[in-house]
Image: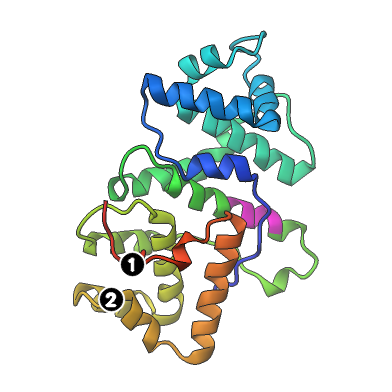
Amino acid sequence: MINLPYITMPDHFVKLLCTNILPSTQVNNNLEMYLNDNKDLNILVKKLFIDLDPDGFLGKIISISGWTGIRNRLACAFLEKNQNGSFPDQVLLSKLSDVLNLENKLRHFTPAGYSRAFLLAYYAKLTLVKLNQMEEVHQYTPLIIKDEVIDLMKFSKSKSVRIDWLILQLSLFESVLGIERLKNFLSSEMKFQALFNMLKPEEQEWFMQNLLVYGASISDYEFFLTDTSIIKE
């Protein structure tokens, strides 16, 4: 069964991943203001994009790279920091290929502009890094998003903004119920609450513990206040 580790993630970066960012002049201006307001993130962006503008002019960097280009370089830099303890002068985007691949698989199930599929994939990537650094590694397992779980999204009736929470819940249910049983339950339009009620008390505790760990890792507690099992755009 899945037992997720807590991951310390860069809060200001995670907030951007949870924000709806569609390309526009206004969004570019807002992104520039956000980076200016967050000094550490500002410095890191200018360092990572010195090849585009040695003077570190954010407006130019955003205009050339766009949000996705900035997001990917930042993600690589934070990944390197987690692995080696320091930020690199240059990043290798190839290290992010598995994260981008998972995001691509989920792109049809979430509205454009959000990076929450990327966020889940990035968290999953960091769980692998974390477990390689832990002494008591046997207590935890990395988050692996199976293609069979992604295929379950065919039962959704519309797109989900918080696709990360939805896929995580499906992954947890699948690890307990198995893919075939879960597929049958979803095809009969069974609600998530009903699925949760089917679990044994100890399984329910395990289920919620994993959700709490993920929520704490990305500093997102809204899930526990709203019903994300309702898939809507």
Specify the segment rendered in magenta: 125-130
Residue at image point 55% right, 71% down: 210
Q: From the viewer's perspective, is residue 179 above or below residue 199?
A: above
Characterize the local packing of mark 1: few (<14), some (14-19) or many (20 or more) Cα atoms within 10 angstroms: some
**Helix, strand or loop at mark 1:** loop
Residues under numbered marks 2 and 1 in contact, where contact means CB atoms less than 8 Å apart: yes
Residue on which the image places disc 1: 229
Amino acid carrying label 2: it is Lys
> 197 or 143, which is in the foreground?
197
Image: 175 above or below 160: below
Which type of secondary structure does the marked residue at label 2 adopt? Answer: loop
Residue 107 is tagged as: none
Q: Is residue 49 visible?
A: yes
Report the residue marked by disc 2. Answer: 191
Q: Which is nearer the eye, 35 or 170? A: 35
Look at the image and tell me whether residue 146 can be seen.
no
First of labels 2, 1 by sequence position: 2
x then y, percent, for residue 113: 36, 37
89 to the left or right of 184: right
Q: In the shown orientation, is residue 143 left or right of residue 107?
A: right
Type of residue at label 1? Ser
Closer to the camera, 38 or 124?
A: 38
Instruction: Tell me the quarter of the picture where residue 183 sits.
Output: bottom left
The residue positioned 22% from the left and 64% from the top of the image is 155
Q: Residue at x 49, y 53 (%)?
A: 120
Q: Nearer the viewer, residue 106 or 220?
A: 220
